[in-house]
């Protein structure tokens, strides 16, 4: 009989399988390191991919082995991405008129972001994004168009928009919420006029469809 994958000998905790919560915690360490300028965006993207495909605790060790966290910022502080020692400014707005706009992967989100679409489509994927504030406000306005905001399981979502012959609210999550006291908050407000604006929780990018549940 072949050796069982993921089997660990008594006392060998490093071979135990990890949970999605473990992956999210490592991802937060990586994003904090990027915010402090100790990882560039390319390295952050590579390590996030390794994190979300890791299976055991041993797989996670080399991902953060060179990222000793010498200090922690106060709970109200947020990481600020540095480029050449200068704070980077993320895009303050996303616009799509008769077209399609997508922001995904590793990108920096300012404390206030405006999304506007006229007969178009906007996707704001925050699952790998670097937030610059504990609470982020997105003014999402759709006129005969669609705005979709994708968030990871650990983010709070407060949706307070006005639908006018349209749809504005929290969509059907693909993963259950995994909220913690230090979870960041995404506040979405605006108007959907004969259009749609929705916030949906989704699993990490690259998660195989067979592992995505229905909730």
Image: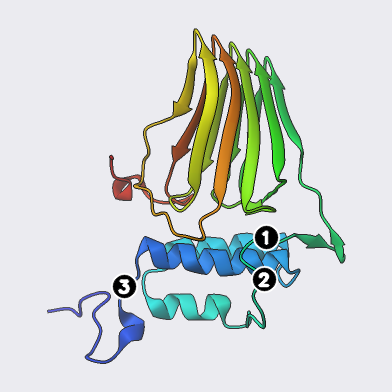
Q: Is residue 18 above or below residue 174?
A: below
- Which sits earlier in the primary sequence, circle 2 or circle 3? 3
Please identify, in this view, whether the residue under mark 1 or under mark 3 is nearer the observer: 1
Q: Quadrant of residue 161?
A: top right
Labels in figure, total:
3
Q: Residues within 10 Å of mark 1 (few under 14, many from 20)?
A: some
| Picture quarter with the N terminus | bottom left
- Nearest the eye: 128 or 43: 128
Residue at far bottom of view: 11
> What is the number of the mark on residue 73?
2
Left or right of 88 in this view: 199 = left
Does the CB distance between marks 1 and 3 fall below 8 Å? no
- Nearest the eye: 69 or 202: 69
Does the CB distance between marks 2 and 1 fall below 8 Å? yes
Q: Residue 147 in the image: x percent, y percent?
A: 57, 26
Q: How far is disc 2 from disc 1 in space, using C-alphas?
A: 8 Å
Q: Residue at x 34, y 47 (%)?
A: 176
List the residue tagged with mark 1: 78
- Which sits earlier in the primary sequence, circle 1 or circle 3? 3
């Amino acid at each position: 009989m072949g050796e069982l994958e993921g089997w660990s000998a008594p006392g060998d905790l490093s071979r135990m399988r990890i949970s999605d919560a473990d992956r999210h915690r490592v991802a937060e360490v990586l994003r904090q390191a990027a915010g402090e300028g100790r990882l560039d965006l390319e390295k952050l993207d590579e390590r996030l991919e390794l994190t979300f495909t890791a299976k055991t605790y041993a797989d996670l060790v080399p991902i953060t082995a060179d990222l000793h966290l010498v200090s922690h910022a106060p709970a109200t502080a947020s990481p600020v991405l540095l480029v050449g020692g200068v704070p980077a400014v993320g895009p303050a707005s996303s616009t799509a008129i008769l077209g399609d706009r997508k922001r995904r992967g590793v990108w920096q989100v300012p404390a206030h972001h405006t999304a506007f679409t006229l007969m178009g489509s906007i996707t704001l994927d925050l699952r790998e994004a670097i937030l610059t504030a504990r609470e982020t406000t997105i003014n999402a306005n759709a006129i005969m168009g669609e705005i979709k905001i994708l968030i990871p399981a650990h983010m709070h979502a407060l949706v307070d928009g006005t639908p006018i012959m349209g749809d504005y609210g929290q969509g059907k999550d693909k993963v259950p919420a995994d909220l913690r006291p230090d979870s960041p908050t995404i506040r979405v407000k605006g108007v959907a006029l004969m259009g749609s604006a929705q916030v949906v929780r989704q699993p990490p990018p690259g998660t195989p469809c067979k592992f995505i549940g229905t909730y």
